[in-house]
Image (cartoon, helix red, strand yellow):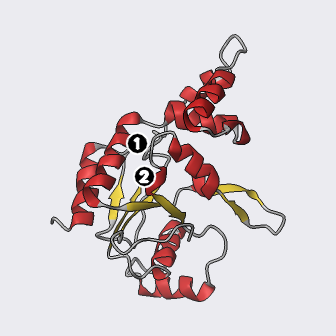
Amino acid sequence: MHEQIRSMERKIIFLDIDGVLQPIDSRKRFRHVRNPNGESDMPRLYELLEYDFNIDYREHHRYDVAAVFFDWDKESIALLKLTLNLTGAMFVLSSDWRLTDLQPNGDWGDGYGRMKDFFTIYGLEKYYIDNTECNYIDKAFIEEANAKYDGKEGETLPSRTIEILEWLSRNPDVEKWVAIDDMRLTGLDGHFVNTKRRYKWRDAEKAIKILNDCF
């Protein structure tokens, strides 16, 4: 784990990006990376971001930086901040955004530092503590989790559900948690907010109720 969870921080949000903070149909980044005249807004954006945050975003892929700045939905970000502040939760990234390029050993690279830079643009970095495991999860754990799952005959848990449960198994002090995702994550009954296109007010209400035990 990248940062220790303090004893008072026992509420966790497992956060997806696409379909949560970034609407799945948003494509603004493309016209900023290269507009119809063949020009790009990125050099100026890099300058502004470095001035504001003292981070050289040229180290990251230009389409990712443009997506974060132009495509991430500002209302959804505000609602996520509201959720975090009203519940005292921190968040763990479960999205594929946590992955970087494949390493020589065949594992995915850990994108924690890259994502922390991106979250800094919106003041979310202070709530971001870790990523779910993206490489090796013990086979015995997967088999046990599926054995406990009361789904349809022959149905197994989605890989993202497994990754969330595995993270929780390594952090038993977490008392309340919720996963926010546009994919249907079976096996997380009572701990799941299924977004449609982006994180909206009704989603925030549900997440806050789950984390504050307000049912």
Q: Residue sitting at 40 percent across and 77 percent down?
A: 152
- Residue at 50% of width from left, 74% of height from top? 167
Q: Identify the residue at the far top of this view.
A: 37
- Amino acid type for the residue under numbered disc 2: Asp
Image spot of residue 7 (x, y percent): 36, 75
Question: Height in image: 213 above or below 21?
Answer: below
Q: Residue at x 53, y 56 (%)?
A: 95
As helix, strand or loop, the secondary structure at mark 1 comes to loop
Q: Are marks 2 and 1 in contact (CB under 8 Å)?
A: yes
Query: Could you say where residue 115 lies in the image, as x and y percent from the top left?
Result: 58, 51
Of residues 131 and 25, the one drawn nearer to the viewer in this rendering: 131
Q: Nearer the viewer, residue 161 or 215?
A: 215
Amino acid at the residue labelled 1 = Arg
Q: Kindly tell me whether residue 108 is visible in this rendering.
A: yes
The residue singled out by tag 1 in the image is: 197
Question: Residue sitting at 40 percent across and 68 percent down?
Answer: 186
Q: Which residue is mark 2?
A: 182
Mark 2 or 1, nearer chain start: 2
- Under circle 2, the secondary element is loop
**Dot 1: within a 10 Å radius of its alpha carbon, few (fewer than 14), some, or many (20 or more) residues?**
some
